[in-house]
Image (spheres, grey):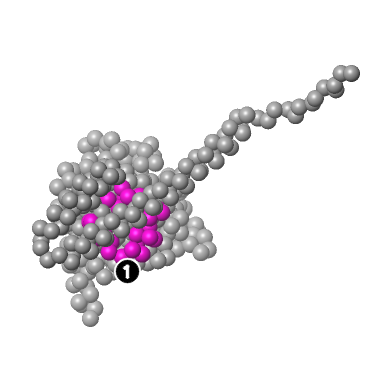
Amino acid sequence: MSQPPVHTPPPSQPDALLGEIRQLIEHSRQQLAGAVNSALTTLYWHVGQRIRSEVLQNARASYGEQIVSILSRQLERDYGRGFSEKNLRHMLRFAEVFPQAQIVSATRRQLSWTHFRTLIYIGDPLKRDFYLQMCQQEGWSTRTLQERLDSQLFERTALSRQPDALLAQELASLRQRGEMTPPLLLKDPYVLDFLGLNDRYLEKDLEDAILRELESFLLELGAGFSFVARQKRIQLDQDDFYIDLLFYNRRLKRLVAIDLKLGDFKAEYKGQMELYLRWLAKYEQEPGEAPPLGIILCSGKKREQIELLELDASGIHVAEYLTVLPPREVLQAKLHEAIALSRARLENRGGEDV
């Protein structure tokens, strides 16, 4: 007697099933890689801390050199190149720069050993803390961190112009509550070398180039920016006005208007931007949002005029833009001079208020 035919269920969609399994595998791999990185970072800190403790107990200056060299020979033979003399010195530096285990424990899941290896050689503690917090808050890769260091991001932020006490306070607020403030995001100058503009161009050319390279421009603006409009039309008393570029920043919870200027800053630009900001506050600002900010991008600045106009009080930030990145030494000297002048001005103002 013949058996009745067996009815097999229709085959499931193999592509969809394969996709789901791949997602499971990739997710597990990422979790495993994160766990391994976290464990290695902790191990390297403990190794560095133990060597540091041994070195501090010995009064001879040459002892540190000797002990690292002796240890590396044996450890590299037993455990591989990860414990070479060079890497042991990285671990020792790691423990010296971050002497408290709590800091390492709080950041080891977001930052890799490569992140830390870059951060530990930043000499200024506040500058180091800035980059550490931005890596955590924005999920920077090690490549992004290096790019931001190379472009001297910290020195270009409005934050770097503030006195150390206020700078430390802003970073503490970011670390404890994740609060992003305008000084952390606003820059001067903005580096727009990716636009590919030559020496002669019009404001429209600058605007067109920014929109062509919008992704790169958003990265240069900083965390949380999204594009809203180009040539945003404003009507007042039968007159038309146009905001060159309008953005929204989700971290600051506010609109950001950008005015593009080819030449040096002029005092009349303040009134124009104030008009834009007040119109935006009246007609575009949503409940729960902070007042709009304005950024005037110029090819040159006049510091005394900007200082006397007290633009910060109006929510206006004036910054230069660079379409060609100057040599690192030139940019560095210019930024250090600007930081020194800004801090001296703030200290003088503070003395007058007392």
Q: Which stretch appears magenta?
A: 92-117
Locate the C terminus by quadrant.
bottom left
In this orientation, does residue 57 appear?
yes
Please identify the dominant SS of the magenta region.
helix
Q: Residue furthest bottom?
A: 354
Indicate whether 86 appears above or below 302. Answer: above
- Asked where in the image residue 132 lies, by quadrant, the reply is bottom left
Q: Which residue is label 1 attached to?
A: 169
186 is within the stretch colored magenta: no
Left or right of residue 177, residue 83 in this image: left
Mark 1: secondary structure:
helix
Q: Position of residue 262 (x, y in %)?
A: 26, 45
Residue 51 image point, x, y percent = 23, 59
The answer to whether residue 11 is above or below residue 59 is above
Q: Is residue 136 above or below residue 195?
A: below
- Closer to the camera in the image, 180 or 112: 112
- Residue 57, percent from left and from top: 18, 66
Residue 115 drawn in magenta: yes
